[in-house]
Image (cartoon, rainbow, N blue to C red):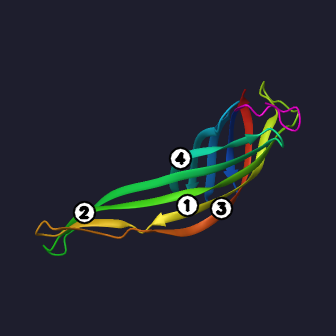
Amino acid sequence: FAGGSSTSLVGTYSGVLTGPTNALGIFVVGIHDVGAAEGDFNIFIGGAFYGGTIIGIGDPGDASFHGVVQGQQVSDFSFFNDNFFGFNSGSATIEGTAAGLVDALIEDTGSAFAGGNGTRMTGTATVDVRQRKPTQTTTDANGNQVTTGGGFKKVGSLDFTVDGFKQSD
């Protein structure tokens, strides 16, 4: 379906979220004739990877895309301490989420490159980052296990520029 111009919104779009230092998001989203637009979303923030999804709506009335992105981070590691035969061993898990809103316009720029088309998706996104307080499971010399930590806290809200293009119809 066409938007407020002659630009057809139906198709597959890919792009990046740029802006904050040490942060980069990438996405691929398909806008269909009927139903929600959906795809993959990944973001790297401060060396951490968050993998997830993007879902939204392509509005033909004003040639826009409004969507929600959500990614998750899970990192596990093991440890062993031996404080002179009073050892502890166990594992720890670090979890986080990166979720937010995307608002973009879709327009035909009229300039195709290397056989592609000139339809661009440009706009803004805000992504909130939340980290779970690390959970840690320890086992003492007697084999007793204790898990501590948990609970999410907001650690930041990042503003991005969205820059994408239509890959296929």
Secondary structure of residue under mark 4 = strand
> Would residue 20 appear left or right of 155 to someone viewing this image?
right
Res 24 visible: yes
- Which label sits in the foreground, 1 or 2? 2
Three-letter amino acid code of the residue under disc 3: Thr
Q: Earlier in the sequence, mark 2 or mark 4?
A: 4
**Amino acid beneath label 1:** Gly
Give the vertical position of 135 relative to 69 (above or below).
Answer: below
Query: Crowding at label 4, few (<14), some or many (≥20) Cα neighbours within 10 Å?
Result: some
Q: Residues within 10 Å of mark 1 (few under 14, many from 20)?
A: few
Q: Which residue is mark 2?
A: 90
The local crowd at label 2, few if under 14, some if 14 to 19, many if 20 or more residues have their Cα within 10 Å, is some
Of mark 3 and mark 1, the one earlier in the sequence is: 3
Residue annotated with mark 1 = 46
| Position of residue 105 measured from the top left corner of the image (x, y, whole percent) | 80, 45
C-alpha gap between disc 2 and disc 3: 34 Å
Q: Which mark, by number, is residue 52?
A: 4
Q: What segment carries the magenta color?
A: 1-11
Q: Amino acid at mark 2?
A: Gly
Distance from Cα at disc 2 to Cα at disc 4? 28 Å
In the image, what residue type sits under mark 4?
A: Gly
Residue at figure coordinates x 56%, y 57% from the top left: 98
- On residue 21, which mark appears? 3
